[in-house]
Image (tube, rainbow, N blue to C red):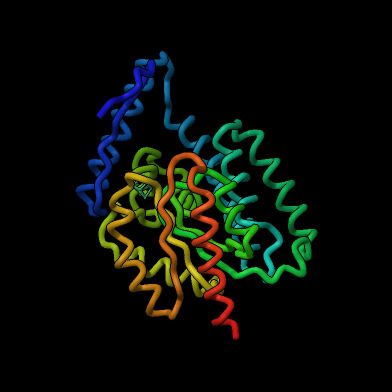
Amino acid sequence: MKYLPTPFKKLMGIPCKVSRATLSYFEDEFDLFRRDLEEHFGVAITPEALDQSIRLYNRSRELLEQLYELRKADPPPITGAEVIEVIRAGWIMPREQYNPLLEALLQEVTSKPDRLAGSDSYRLLVYGSELDEPDYLKVIEDLGGMVVADDLCTGSRYFTLPVEEDGNPLRALAIRYLTRPFCARMHPTSERVERLQQLARDFQVEGVIHETIKFCDINVGNYPITKAGLDELGLPSLCLEREYIMAGAGQMKTRVGAFLESLEGRRG
Ligand code: SF4
């Protein structure tokens, strides 16, 4: 494996199972990370500062959760591509600025529940690996799909479950990151299947797209198991692999278009 020579890097060992032993190991990993950061940047990372930061990020999580809830409406007041843009903005701007903007956006979206009225798009759940490219969902939505829910590393799994406040912050971080909704690398997969089934029911989806970025092999390997769980609900699914850039959009359009046509027959 080749790593770029960045001024600071730290690799953390992340357990694949949740137990008392792995939680305590992961808390130690956070502590080593904290010490390495302090040493490299010459700063002090106090429990009080961590607690303050946790509150700030929890507020973002709470607001994003509220935005996601709005998508249960039919039609939702915001598209899946727009939501990805909103989440992405939070990664590149200070949280102190992001949270008030998110509050204002929520107010605006809530005040326009009919913003997408007249849309007869198919309600879709997209799940899989990381996806930070709004254009990817835009291709799907331009063809007549509406992404109303997701289970992506950079989507709902990114903000679901707050970090406990007022405790040991490193312990709280370890608990949150290991017990939040599972990615494909975590065991047991049955928890992931149950979450997908719950999302499909809660957001009344009509079809499911399994998205996987190249080289996230565990996510591809998980597909037969998660698909079987969605089959139990009678939900059709489509598996799409993608590059880091928006290459292969033409082929993707053909496959998504055919998938949406198959949903048309089901609506009767
Ligand atoms: S292993 Fe794959 S599914 Fe898990 S966080 Fe990484 S990209 Fe996402």
- Residue at 78% of width from left, 65% of height from top? 114
Question: Which residue is more in the foreground, 32 or 258?
Answer: 258
Which residue is farthest bottom? 268
Residue 43 showing in the rendered view: yes
**Which residue is most to the left?**
21
**Which residue is painted at 43% across and 55% down in the image?**
211
**Residue situated in front as seen by the camera: 105 or 47:** 105
Judged from this view, the residue extending furthest toward the top is: 42
- Position in image of residue 256 (x %, y %): 52, 62
Q: Nearer the viewer, residue 36 or 109?
A: 109
Residue 149 position, x and y percent, is 54, 62
Residue at x 45% of width, y 40% of height: 244
Q: Where on the picture, by quarter, is residue 45? A: top left
Count of numbered tags: 0
- Quadrant location of the N terminus? top left
Instruction: Return the residue nearer the eye: 169 or 174.
Output: 174
> Which of the 4 image quarters holds residue 27?
top left
Is 55 placed left or right of 128 in the picture?
A: right
| Residue 248 in the image: above or below residue 182 | above
- Residue at 60% in and 64% down: 145
Q: Position of residue 130 (x, y in %)?
A: 44, 47
